[in-house]
């Protein structure tokens, strides 16, 4: 049997679940996990269905067979192999906690991604990347060469066939053109203090104000800086006993875990854009299992 995932998004309507499940049954597919959401506000329907398909069935053969149903209901859909690794480019500057975490998680199979390259405007992590047989691309970015730098970055994305770009503390603002071209395919991480604590040293600003919670937010990148649809968030409680340096360390830990969870959800095809928000379904059983522990 072949394990596949079907994702569907379309306008709300009667009989959608019956049409989908009936097709799967008629084609010998057994549903092993299913999530759906009908948004009354946006009048949009979303579904993610994991199935076991009979030998000989492929994503392409099921796609061809499902097309008449999809066209009749104006569905956007996709059949994929369950657990297929998504080709991913990571972009980083000088803070390496998220990059190192993603390299490790990818290496042990804890994330359904294949890191096909790392792009940086600094050379700090070149050795760490190439030592894992991953291409490292140094592209210096200045105020004067930004269009050329972004063109070089996009060339790498296209040459590698990357489906996802991760800004793992990449400290450069992307142009509107790049954000639009890669809409829904760039994920960023930032501290959750925005917009309260902007600029340099946000954790020190938070410490000075005596905050009790610090955290992080991972979201899709849009032309509106740090205002894209949110994928994942988390917090950690702090007290007066922590120092500003403690805030930084705890914040980085939350940033790394939040970004990893957001990437997992996206690469596992569990995230659906719904206007300015997201619909995120729970993972199927076994989705978090790692191939090895080191």
Image (spheres, grey):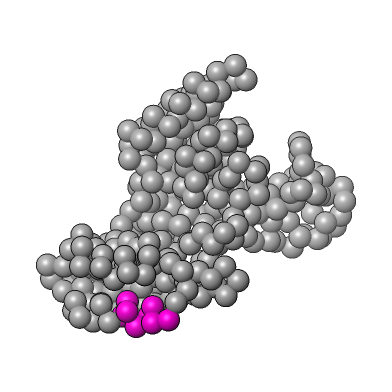
Report whether 197 appears left or right of 110: right
Residue at point 46%, 47% (across, down): 185
Question: Vertical placement of 250 versus 141: above or below?
Answer: below
Report whether 106 appears left or right of 141: left
Question: Vertical placement of 120 versus 24: above or below?
Answer: above
Residue at point 87%, 47% (across, down): 208
Residue at point 43%, 53% (across, down): 105
**In the image, farthest residue toward the front:** 72
| 72, 92: nearer the viewer | 72
Residue at point 75%, 51% (across, down): 193
Q: Quadrant of residue 1?
A: bottom left
Q: Quadrant of residue 39?
A: bottom right
Q: Main secondary structure of the magenta part?
A: helix
Q: Which range is magenta?
A: 14-21
Report whether 242 appears left or right of 181: right
Q: Is residue 227 magenta?
A: no
């Amino acid at each position: 049997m072949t394990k596949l995932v079907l994702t569907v998004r379309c306008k709300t309507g009667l009989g959608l679940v019956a049409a989908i499940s009936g097709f799967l049954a008629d084609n010998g597919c057994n549903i092993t996990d299913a999530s759906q959401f009908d948004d009354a506000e946006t009048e949009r329907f979303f579904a993610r269905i994991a199935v076991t398909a009979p030998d000989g069935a492929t994503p392409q053969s099921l796609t061809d067979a499902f097309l008449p149903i999809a066209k009749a209901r104006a569905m956007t859909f996709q059949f994929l192999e369950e657990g297929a690794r998504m080709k991913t480019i990571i972009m980083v500057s000088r803070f390496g906690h998220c990059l190192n975490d993603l390299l490790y998680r990818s290496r042990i199979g804890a994330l359904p991604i294949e890191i096909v390259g790392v792009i940086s405007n600094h050379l700090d992590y070149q050795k760490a990347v190439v030592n894992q047989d991953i291409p490292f691309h140094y592209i210096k970015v200045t105020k004067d060469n930004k269009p050329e730098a972004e063109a070089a970055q996009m060339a790498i994305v296209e040459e590698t066939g990357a489906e996802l770009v991760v800004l793992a503390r990449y400290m450069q603002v992307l142009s509107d053109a790049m954000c639009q071209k890669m809409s829904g395919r760039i994920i960023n991480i930032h501290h959750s203090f925005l917009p309260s604590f902007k600029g340099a040293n946000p954790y020190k600003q938070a410490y000075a104000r005596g905050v009790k919670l610090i955290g992080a937010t991972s979201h899709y990148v849009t032309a509106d800086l740090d205002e894209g649809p949110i994928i994942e968030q988390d917090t950690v409680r702090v007290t007066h006993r922590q120092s500003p340096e403690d805030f930084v360390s705890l914040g980085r830990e939350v940033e790394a875990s939040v970004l990893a969870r957001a990437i997992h959800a996206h690469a596992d095809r569990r995230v659906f854009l719904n206007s300015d928000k997201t619909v995120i379904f729970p993972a199927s059983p076994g989705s978090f299992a790692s191939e090895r522990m080191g």
